[in-house]
Amino acid sequence: MIDTLGDIPRAIHETREETPDGVLLFDASIIPQASAQSFSAAGWKSVRPVEDVLHSGGRGNTLILGDGHDEYVLRHFRRGGLVGRFIRDRYLWLGEDRTRSFAEWRVLQKLANLGMRVPRPAVARYCRRGPFYTADIITVRVPGIRSLSARLAEGAGGGALWRHIGEALCRFHDAGVNHADLNAHNVQIDEAGRMWLLDFDKARIMPAAAWRQKNLARLHRSLRKIRGLDQRVRYSERDWGQLLAGYFQASRSA
């Protein structure tokens, strides 16, 4: 059983358009006139940074864009770890289909077309310069969501929430979603208490294997880390037990 939005929204179709230094991939029904200007602050009526109670250590520079009616999220791909200290945002060219932005756009496309709780992909691009490229992606902003880390810092929690998160994660796993960076910032909760997943950089759709346990272990480490960094965070190992109870209950009922 897969946790979906109920009625599956209109399918996302990709349009490919070449630019002087790369390629755009977009759904024309979401952003009809995608261009390089879509990735510039000058191309939008409003631009503001993403703000949260606890800041993610993510690699991307992230902005919220507004056209006066809808809002979108722009993320510029940046490297992490030791390599990121020397090479901030360039990646080795290995072919168009292996660019970080196009790979993420297509994972989101597949999941959004299934009606799963992920941002709908709007535009992705890469800009190639010799053997390297840079990348960006724009997704439709999901209204009313807050990161799990922010929720916990504000005192939200409870067994029902943790069991729901476990159930939802199991259903993402049942759909083959190997999320490469499952943490308390990318797990998001909407106003109705439903879980969404963000940031599918390096995510893959693949058969079930040990990666499911590794995903959960990564989230577990993230929760322990934010609890150690901020005393406001209300999280205990009992909460983790509730999450696992929800996960395995969903697994048995699948």
Image: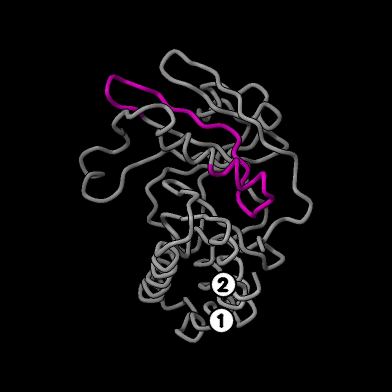
Instruction: From the top left corner, tell me how far across and down residue 221 is, in percent.
Output: 37, 71
Mark 1 surroundings within 10 Å by alpha-carbon count, few (fewer than 14), some (14 through 19), many (20 or more): some
> Would residue 224 appear left or right of 107 to someone viewing this image?
left
Q: Secondary structure at mark 2?
A: helix
Towards the viewer: 32 or 246 = 246
- Label 2 sits on what residue type? Gly
- Label 1 sits on what residue type? Ala
Q: Which residue is mark 2?
A: 166
- The residue under the point 62% across, 63% down is 195
Say whether marks 2 and 1 touch (CB < 8 Å): yes
Instruction: From the top left corner, tell me how far across and down residue 218 is, in percent.
Output: 39, 66
Instruction: From the top left corner, tell me how far across and down residue 121 is, in percent.
Output: 59, 39
Q: Which quadrant of the rendered structure holds the C terminus? A: bottom right
Towards the viewer: 203 or 210 = 210
- The residue under the point 67% across, 57% down is 144
Q: Is residue 130 magenta?
A: yes
Q: Which mark is residue 54?
A: none
Q: Earlier in the sequence, mark 2 or mark 1?
A: 2
Q: Secondary structure at mark 1?
A: helix
**Distance (Cα) linking label 2 and label 1:** 7 Å
Image height check: is 196 above or below 12?
A: below
Query: How was the colour assigned to the protein in this rendering?
Result: one colour
Mark 2 surroundings within 10 Å by alpha-carbon count, few (fewer than 14), some (14 through 19), many (20 or more): many
Q: Residue furthest bottom?
A: 238
Q: Which quadrant of the rendered structure holds the N terminus? A: bottom right
- The residue under the point 53% across, 66% down is 148
Part of the protein shown in magenta: 107-133
- The residue under the point 67% across, 68% down is 193
Instruction: From the top left corner, tell me how far across and down residue 120 is, in percent.
Output: 63, 43
Q: Is residue 192 magenta?
A: no
Q: Which residue is mark 1?
A: 245
